[in-house]
Image (cartoon, rainbow, N blue to C red):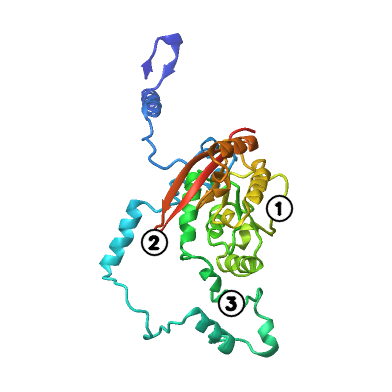
Amino acid sequence: MALLPSRGVVISVPVLVLSVAAATIFLFFLLSSLSFSPPPCTCPIPASSSSIGSSGADNNNVRFGDRISASAEDIEWVKSQIEANGLHMQQNVLRKGINPRTRQQQLQDLLQFKGISHYEGEEANNHTALPCPGELLVEEHHSNYGEPWAGGRDVFEFLADSAHLTPNSKVLEIGCGTLRVGLHFIRYLNPDRFHCLERDELSLMAALRYELPSQGLLYKRPLIVKGEDMNFSKLGDGAMYSLIYASAVFLHMPDKLVWIGLEKLVSRLKPLEGRIFVSHNIKFCSRLGGEECTKRLNHLGLEYLRKHTHDSLLFNHYEIWFEFRRFKA
């Protein structure tokens, strides 16, 4: 027995040893936890709501590192894939398993043969939820433009980057046609964020009966309305847009109607951050002369910012765009 003089308490040696050991272990872990600092995090940090604009976009909808336009590294990668596979353009002729057809030939085949496997009689109407006209199925409307359908992606990339859009931005296209450009906006934006005014009925049919269903975008619920003469009443009163654009539309309107439209649109454009883009030219403005044009724009609360040119990714083509903003509330 070990006798400790403190108040005559008697403690056995084994108990004393165990107590000291336990205290030592506890002290070790305590010091370790205080001195340990975790390694710096190298994970990407999602953007906060303050960094994605005043629209209050849900952070879950903005993925870190997303790009809209292809980077130089992307271009080099696809070139390397073509080279690695030894690929060269070939003449598109009949070959094993491939029977090239023009759109007109494809439409005739569809009308005559109805596809390789199909229903007959009454059953023909019982298995297709959204029957689509053959002219739309063979994509005749993709040839309605003076340039390749792929140019729609070029327009989207330029406008989305220039206007600093996020998925929660709201966009209005004046004259969206068959959604050559609009499809890319609809895919990028959150549901209900893309609006469009279009006057051509066949274009609207192509957009609603073929493009949206075939691209799996019905759930995005874009607001696409038939209207003309710059009548925006069907779009509702509360929408405030981050981007309003017109691609080759104002070219076909009387100047007076363009000014009427701009007057109606100003109140729908977000002050300062919102942008209006007009393609090709702004003769509705330049025909007035520089001083008178500026005066009329300022009266509406608009100011002209700059002229842009944007090159196509896939073919030898560039577009000219004119940028405006609303400078006062």
User: Can you give x and y, in whole percent of width and height, for residue 209 in the image?
Assistant: 63, 69
- Three-letter residue code for mark 1: Asn
Contact? badges 2 and 1 (CB < 8 Å): no
- Three-letter residue code for mark 3: Glu
Image: 288 above or below 154: above
- Three-letter residue code for mark 2: Leu
Between 167 and 228, the residue placed more toward the observer is 228
Residue name at image x 68 percent, y 86 percent: 123
Judge the density around disc 1: few (<14), some (14-19), many (≥20) Cα neighbours within 10 Å: few
Mark 2–mark 3 Cα distance, whole angstroms, equals 26 Å
Residue name at image x 50 percent, y 84 percent: 105
Contact? badges 2 and 3 (CB < 8 Å): no
Secondary structure beneath disc 1? Answer: loop
Image mark for residue 135: 3
Residue, disc 1: 231
Q: Quadrant of residue 177?
A: bottom right
